[in-house]
Amino acid sequence: MNQNVINARVTFRNSPIHVLERFTFKDIKNALLEFRKFSESEECVILQTCNRIEIFATGKNCDIKKIQKTWASLSGLEESAFKENLEIEIDDEAYLHLLKLTSGLDSMVVGEEQILGQIKNSITTARINKASGERLNTLFDKAIRIGTRIRNTTGISKGGISVGSMAVKLAEENIDDLKSKQILVIGTGEVSTLVAKSLNRRGYGFSVTSRTLQRSQAFCETMGGQAVKFEEVLGGFEKYDVIFVATTAPYFLVTYERIAKALKDKKKGMMILDLSNPRTVDEKVATLGNIKLMNLDQIAEMVDKNMRKRQDKVKIVENIINEELQVIEASMKRLDAEPIVKDVFKNIDVLREKELQKALQMLGENDSEKIKIIEDLTKAVVESIVSAPMNNLRKASEQGNPEILDAASKLFNYKKKET
Ligand SMILES: NC(=O)c1ccc[n+]([C@@H]2O[C@H](COP(=O)([O-])OP(=O)(O)OC[C@H]3O[C@@H](n4cnc5c(N)ncnc54)[C@H](OP(=O)(O)O)[C@@H]3O)[C@@H](O)[C@H]2O)c1
């Protein structure tokens, strides 16, 4: 009767960015469908960000082997590729992991805000595509609520620490007198916004480019910076000393050839920070002399330092999570009782209605007020007899007494419907 919730994931913790990108799904909607079909998950949610690809699945016949097989076939990988990269968590451990995600504890930058929005999007996508159901919807809704509350009460997200600010710090640590340098931001999305905010806060001037000049101009109106034409930038990287790249382009924008050409016209070196995953800067550019290339992996190292400073807050968040975990565990166990409870109420109501109609016919009653009184009476009788045992059943389920659920199934002739 009990269904496991399985979390299978490949994240930045075990896999560097270039490895992580091999596990991504090109089409999330299709992946949801395939997981439901081939790994026999009754419910499935996919969380895919630049730092992680995670599956949450549940189903009577679903197991980790089937998930891995489906994942391998979707991403075109050998199953052996998962050996060193895949992490698996089941039930309580999976709930704990989701709470760490929503509260920001498992992020590369502890406490960062984006992950919460990304988790909300994942469950919305699963709902829209009818891939999630009562179990995962309940789990995600609760974890999102708890994560939001933890962030608000502990201040773990405060302090402006983001991938953007970490990247700017990294530039500061590696470049002397950054204020005198020409800084460029490629991209006008979420991450570029974080970079721009951080540059502004520290008083650095910068240029911004993206495929459409209008979008760059609109970006600069709110975020500061100088909008530059995309084509102008691609053909003239020599004008810049520090380049932040944060786009979702499926190919290299900063190519070896473009940078090699730029270096010919430029006497000084350049620093390029690729915040994209998949990467949009060809790693080969690092082989050119005078180029310092950094990507999300280096940011992760920096975050480790940041983590040590935040240990006090992390401890507080961990304590709250441990308390909240018990609430989630109880809610999830309670769900095991719901199908029986619903079934019993439904069957009894059918009987009640049948007997009511029989009695009304025998009485030959047409007065609607009297009919309503009799009907309410039947409902009240049913309610008062059935409610207490059903609530006790729910409690037994919360307390992890599956034998009481089995007994109730037998007593009420309940058979789990195949999905
Ligand atoms: N969000 C996060 O938490 C996070 C954290 C770390 C790293 N990242 C990585 O950072 C990158 C950007 O993420 P984001 O959240 O900022 O994405 P986003 O908000 O969706 O913005 C995407 C940006 O990429 C540009 N773009 C898309 N296709 C392009 C192409 N073919 N050529 C040039 N520009 C193109 C878009 O420009 P247009 O307006 O022209 O479409 C837009 O400016 C991604 O690779 C992501 O994995 C994200």
Image (cartoon, rainbow, N blue to C red):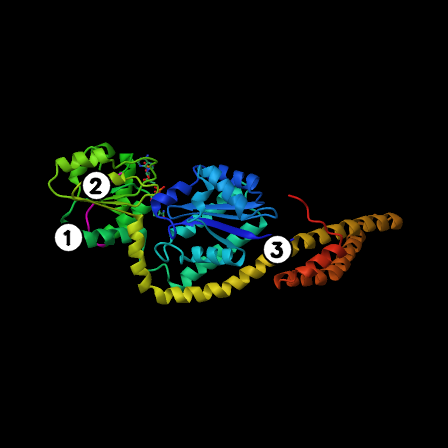
- The C terminus - image quarter: top right
Q: Position of residue 414 (x, y in %)?
A: 73, 51
User: What residue is pinned by disc 3?
Assistant: 335
Q: Position of residue 7 (x, y in %)?
A: 50, 51
Looking at the image, can residue 141 be seen? no
Label 1 sits on what residue type? Asp
Label 2 sits on what residue type? Thr
Q: Quadrant of residue 403?
A: bottom right
Label 3 sits on what residue type? Leu
CA neighbours of label 2 inside 10 A, class few (<14), some (14 to 19), many (20+): few
Q: Is residue 285 left or right of residue 40?
A: left
The secondary structure type at the circle numbered 1 is loop
Residue 355 painted magenta: no
Looking at the image, can residue 103 be seen? yes
* Residue in the picture at 51% in, 52% down: 140
Q: Is residue 206 left or right of residue 357?
A: left
Mark closer to the observer (2, 3): 2
**Circle on res. 287:** 2
User: What residue is pinned by disc 1?
Assistant: 176
Choose between 280 and 63: the one closer to the eye. Answer: 63
Choose between 35 and 78: the one closer to the eye. Answer: 78
CA neighbours of label 3 inside 10 A, class few (<14), some (14 to 19), many (20+): some
In the displayed structure, 19 sits above or below 154; it is: above
Mark closer to the observer (2, 1): 2
* Residue in the picture at 20% in, 54% down: 173
Q: Quadrant of residue 183?
A: top left
Q: Identify the mark nearer the N-term, 1 or 3.
A: 1
Q: Which residues are magenta?
A: 202-209
The secondary structure type at the circle numbered 3 is helix
- Point out the residue furthest to the left here: 267
Q: Is residue 58 left or right of residue 350?
A: left
